[in-house]
Image: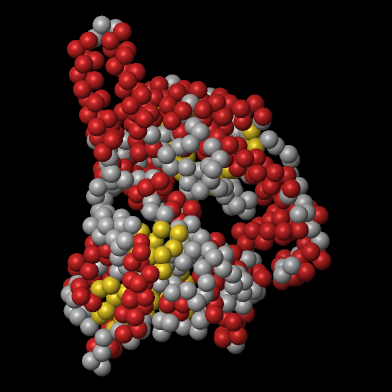
Amino acid sequence: MLRLNLLEETRFEKLPVQVFENPQTASIHVAHKIAQLIKNKNAQGEKVVLGLATGATPVLVYQELIRLHKQEGLSFKNVITFNLDEYYPMQPDAAQSYVHFMKQQLFNHIDIDMNNVHIPDGTLPEDEIADFCLSYEKKINDAGGLDLQILGIGRTGHIGFNEPGSAPNSGTRLVTLDDLTRRDASRDFGGKDNVPRKAITMGIGTIFKAREIILMAWNEKKAAIVKKAVEGEISSEVPATYLQLSDQVTFILDEDAASALTRFHLPWLVKDCVWDKTLIKKAVVWLASTLQKPILKLTEEDYNNNGMAQLATEMGPVYNINIDVFNQIQHTITGWPGGKPEADDSQRPERALPAKKRAIVFSPHPDDDVISMGGTFIRLADQGHEVHVAYQTSGNTAVWDDDALRFVEFTIDFLKSQGFESNSEQLAKQYQEMRDFINKKKPNQADTIPLRTIKGLIRKGEAIAGARYAGLPDENIHFQNLPFYDRNKSAKQVDYEDDIQETMALLQKIKPHQVFAAGDFADPHGTHKVCFDIIYQALKRLKETDEWVKDCWLWLYRGAWHEFEIHEIEMAVPLSPQEVARKRMAIFKHQSQKDIPVFPGDDAREFWVRAEERTSETAQRYNQLGLAEYEAIEAFVRFKF
């Protein structure tokens, strides 16, 4: 019976999937699998041939293999490795090269014979690559073929650098990289323009010959493409779907990467559920959205025909379910994000008391506050609350070099106009040093301290203008410049203790009733996630000692790229057309991020356009569910400790 239940639960999945709680436990599982293979082969006096991957995904696997080598005596002397790919052109000693990556992450820390290590050569003349690729295939075959190939997956669905359009029988070859792949790599190269346009990669046919294949994926950012690879139709548009044709493949996922799979995202379609309030709300919102019907018009037939008969039977009649869910969503809507004074707050998202609250908006970058919750920010100030904003990082990496030079040129001219010739001459010398550095700057090279400073000041001035426009007095505008932000540019291991202490001190000074923080965790290594973790640790520690923390609520907002799902939203702040226009003007204060920012992400729209269209879409979704029609809605989820 258990076997039948599992088959039913995974019936949408076209290949084996194992889901682990987090990347750490999943990586340890994979590393121990590799270690056992090495030991088994060693006991038989044989070499083991491993296909290795690069990128963030396998890093924890390599860390565990290093630990097994150093602490438990695992030897790699009988191991032969073949890496999947390498950028082209690429020097092996470049920071972005996969030769450098593999040495730093694994080879320098184990006893492998480097003569047994094979990585595609990014330095070859292009007319020699075809012969090299044939030789690479021959070396794999001569070694006995790959015993185990580990893979990650790109957001295009690529495995190795087999981009959309790759053939299932393709061999090792030179390929052109997809634009999304290059955008995803842009931070490592200091901008997309510096990312090579080509790469040498093992082919899908080469990968298929491995006796065992493990594809790993972590975090929510990979959830959508994992779903396509596991549940979608086989297509050259998603090369990872070709893995469905192999009997030797296992997908190893953490819970976030698996979250879009049907058995986790829409469990009522594959099994009987234990229906709690949260799951009921999610299912009913999904049903109404799928059928494009208001919640209160859903019928028993709608439930029965769309996998929700169990809910209708156990919790019905369905009209009562509809009313309950409709009321829950309606009660998230409030024009009083700081709580409505002298009002019954039993069905409101925020408390009525105290009537005037102290609130602090934490902004990871200097513009996240107005982009993500500018309307609510302005509303809190308009309604008389004591509102503070804390800019957690300087954001100095996101300013164009020529903008920085332009501001220095302005300052030199201003000093001259005011008769400060000696000061202007000294600055002019520093300005020339900046220009010389920029002309010679390598991709992803950290800026000099003076250049970093001027870029930070540009963003500071913009943030002050935006916060003032929102209605804040200068004394309520705080610039933390958390140390981790600049340390991350050079240090491999970053300690956040001083960041936490600084945040604790600010919180103790303000003693807020409300904390607003960025809740975009799709990229666990991104600045937003790091900034949230610092706030969380600060509040967690203060909760043990400071009484005020017990009355402090932590609200999460999201950025300009995507929004919380409707069933997740706990506070929805509607904006009028006039408030949308005011929010737009606050965003416009951030002139360095206007038009084409340094790090635009995947979305070609300007930040203000993204923000307006995102909040408009949220309002439309509320309206489609049968609720009132608003110009825009900013959404929040309360974080429970």
Q: At 26% from the left edge and 30% from the top edge, which residue is drawn?
A: 434
Near-viewer residue (330 or 91): 91
390 left or right of 232 in image:
left
Instruction: Name the quarter where the N terminus is drawn.
Output: bottom right
Q: Is residue 322 visible?
A: no
629 left or right of 383 in image:
right
Residue 28 x %, y %: 34, 72
373 left or right of 342 in image:
left
Q: At 31% from the left edge and 57% from the top edge, which residue is drawn?
A: 90
Q: Relative to residue 251, is residue 458 depicted above or below?
A: above
Residue 262 x %, y %: 60, 68
Near-viewer residue (623 or 99): 99
Q: At 36% from the left edge and 30% from the top edge, which residue is drawn?
A: 402
Q: Relative to residue 464, is residue 108 depicted above or below?
A: below
Q: At 72% from the left edge and 70% from the top edge, which residue is drawn?
A: 307
Residue 440 x %, y %: 26, 38
Return the residue found at the far bottom: 44
Q: Quadrant of residue 4?
A: bottom right
Return the residue found at the far front: 127
Near-viewer residue (493 or 192): 192
Q: Quadrant of residue 122?
A: bottom left
